[in-house]
Image (cartoon, grey):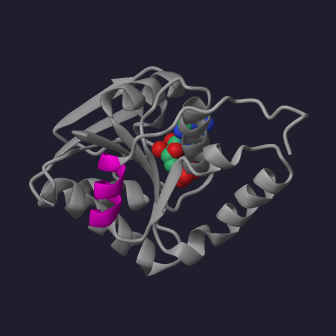
Amino acid sequence: MHAVCVFCGSSPGADPRFLEAARSLGAAIAGSGRTLVYGGAKVGLMGAVADATLVGGGKVVGVLPRALVDREVAHRGLTELHIVSSMHERKRLMADRAEAFIAMPGGLGTLEELFEVWTWAQLGIHSKPLGLFGPRDFFAPLLQYLDHLVAQRFVRAEHRELITVEDDAVALLERLAQHRPAPAPKWIDSSET
Ligand code: AMP
């Protein structure tokens, strides 16, 4: 696991623990000699995780669609900044360049990015590990809803468990590096209980 893709808010959020978490993840990525792949913005938690990785001596690859260069303020101090033509191209390049995905607190964009790579894992399109990093109480309602989807038999328990939840950045990276997802069929058969 050489490069880790991080999805997180383009806003800092309401709780100072979010920025602290972003900085600790950047420091852990740099400290473990890994590369950060992310959306290329200078704002919010995105900017914080990138800055912390750079300060720790790590490499950072940013991927930003041209239309968002001004809106999300392109980070000009990165090891590599790729300006691409669409959101789809951005997500493809980020996914191709990383061996693992981590989502942190964020908004609609973060959720969309997380659920895309999660559904790709569910379909066997990739077998890269997925992590959720940040204060546990922040993620509790989301995890509760996912458990509800499992109970209602829309999501298989194995697919729900594809994500590793941690509030310590170093521990999360170690767990993701060891993770070997087990293949499971996508569809829940009506004969299954
Ligand atoms: P947010 O979590 O909404 O602050 O957004 C975090 C990142 O996700 C930002 O870089 C957004 O540009 C990006 N984003 C927003 N919408 C989408 C989308 N539909 N697909 C992929 N990324 C998105």
Query: Could you tell me what secondary structure mostly forms the magenta stretch?
Result: helix
Q: Quadrant of residue 74?
A: top left
- At a point 49% along the width and 74% down the height, the residue shown is 135
User: For this rendering, which residue is in front, 185 or 49?
Assistant: 185
- At a point 52% along the width and 28% down the height, the residue shown is 87
- Answer whether residue 181 is magenta in the image: no
- The span shown in magenta is 170-178
**Quarter of the picture for ligand 1?**
top right
Does any portion of residue 133 appear in the rendered image? Answer: no
Q: Tell how many labels.
A: 0
Q: Is residue 2 left or right of residue 10?
A: left
Q: Pinpoint residue 172: horizontal percent, then vertical percent.
A: 35, 60
Q: Residue furthest left?
A: 57
- At a point 55% along the width and 41% down the height, the residue shown is 113
Q: Quadrant of residue 83?
A: top left
- At a point 76% along the width and 30% down the height, the residue shown is 187
Q: Is residue 184 left or right of residue 90?
A: right
- Quarter of the picture holding the C terminus: top right
Q: Is residue 190 left or right of residue 163?
A: right
Q: Pinpoint residue 140: horizontal percent, then vertical percent.
A: 64, 71
Does any portion of residue 40 appear in the rendered image? Answer: yes
- Tell me: residue 190, above or below residue 105: above
Q: Pinpoint residue 125: horizontal percent, then vertical percent.
A: 53, 23
- Quarter of the picture holding the N terminus: top left
